[in-house]
Amino acid sequence: MVVFAAGYFWLDVRQRARIDRGVKRHRTDFTVYQYAARALKHGEDPYEATNPRGYRYVYPPLLAVLLQPIADWEPQDAALVFYILSVAALLLAIVWLRRLGTAWPPVIAAAVICLGFAHQGFQRGQVTHILLALQVGALVCLLDRRFVCAGLWLGLGAAIRLTPLLPAYAVGLGLLAAAFTRKGWMPPLRFGGGLAGGLCLGFVLIPWLWLGGARASDVSDRWVEVTQQVYGANVDLEAEYQINEWRFKNQAPRRVLGTWIGWGQGVDFEKERPLFPGGEEPAALSVGAGVVTWGLVLLAALLAIVFLRDPGGTAYGAVYAAIVLLPVLMTRYTWPTHYLMAAPAIVFAAQRGVRSAAVIVLLAGTVLFYAAHAKALEPIGQAGCLMLACVGFLVLLLVRRRREAAA
């Protein structure tokens, strides 16, 4: 196993991180993080720094702060450190998922379906494996009723990338709902304390200790500005951040909806981007994306109030895992590696059999998505096959858990 992991790094991950072979062969996102860390270390703006391919950093400051010790290393050497951390995080997540799944077949099903997502995360040096471990670890803590620890992990995860805030919000809401039905105020207070501690560590204390108060405050302000730009409906991500959100590999609802609207209007396409009249995106695109986002926030709240009151209940783990997956349907761009967050939900869906309808639907969508990498089949990916399969998977998982809870 160690030999395989080392060979995989040397032959694939390391080669992608090298910069001495030219920009076209430099195919990793890790240097986005590293170059932001380098700019931060040398007193420059980490949100203006660009990696060799022109990509810019958009995450909260914490990750750039934590990478300070390897900021000036050669990219391929720094990528090794990050790869080891990612492998360790994934293995830890698998161990915890085995504990949640009670048997190996559900975990193996999750590993098979998510293999491509995990592979692309390693290739690109993405932080997804670490976020997966933090959120699965939080679920283990919740089921053990270690609420402070669960909140801490989710708070630190949110300081790396904001998506763990959704399960944190749902867990907190569920515990509050239980408290109002006279089940005690200590669980939500302990969870809230742990969450506040994790957020304080990630957003305030660690940056303040490393950078100093004034510098940390300036960097945080820049992050807020960048976040508003990246998720603003009228910002051209390709022009500003070198992010081509119209590639079929972006399986986010906003991109899929835009493609469908373009097909419906019969507009021309340029590199998969619909050329809407006047160069302006239709209002229906922004409205539709907003409805999806806020609808999912409301759905998370309803699921929390109904199912997340008592950690350890029949449907608790499955509903939590479904909420962990919801952010892939909320963000403006969702690459394949982000779908690694489906792993916990797959484990719960496969507990009653790996051939369950939910598992089959997601597996079919995943196979179609990778088949769409063939030029002739690209329209399948453009139509959002993986995103639609994810929606179907979540519906089937939640409906079955609702029936089980009712029974």
Image (cartoon, rainbow, N blue to C red):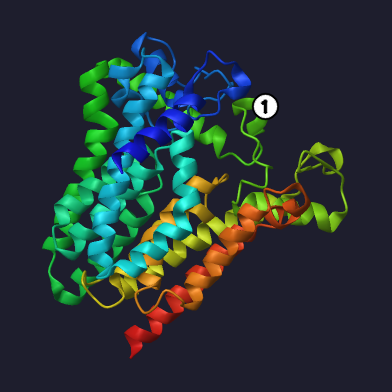
In screen coordinates, is 232 left or right of 383?
Answer: left
Quadrant of the snapshot with the C terminus: bottom left
* Residue 44 spot, x, y in % from top left: 42, 11
Tell me where residue 199 sits by quadrant. top left
Q: Residue furthest front?
A: 3
Quadrant of the snapshot with the N terminus: top left
> Which SS class for mark 1?
helix
Residue in front for this viewpoint, 304 or 24: 24
Residue in front for this viewpoint, 18 or 36: 18
Residue in front for this viewpoint, 25 or 189: 25
In screen coordinates, is 255 left or right of 95?
Answer: right
Q: Residue at x 30, y 63 (%)?
A: 173
* Residue 330 spot, x, y in % from top left: 52, 53
Tell me where residue 307 sits by quadrant. bottom left
* Residue 232 spot, x, y in % from top left: 59, 39
Residue 304, can we see it? no
Q: Residue at x 25, y 49 (%)?
A: 92
Q: Residue at x 41, y 14 (%)?
A: 39
Total labels drawn? 1
In screen coordinates, is 86 left or right of 338?
Answer: left
| Residue where numbered disc 1 is placed | 239
Residue in front for this viewpoint, 303 or 396: 396
Disc 1 residue type? Answer: Ala
> Is 407 placed above or below 353 here?
below
Q: Residue at x 32, y 18 (%)?
A: 70
* Residue 331 spot, x, y in % from top left: 53, 48
- Residue density around tag 1, few if under 14, some if 14–19, many if 20 or more, within 10 Å: few
Residue 81, can we see it? yes
> Is 359 placed above or below 371 here?
below
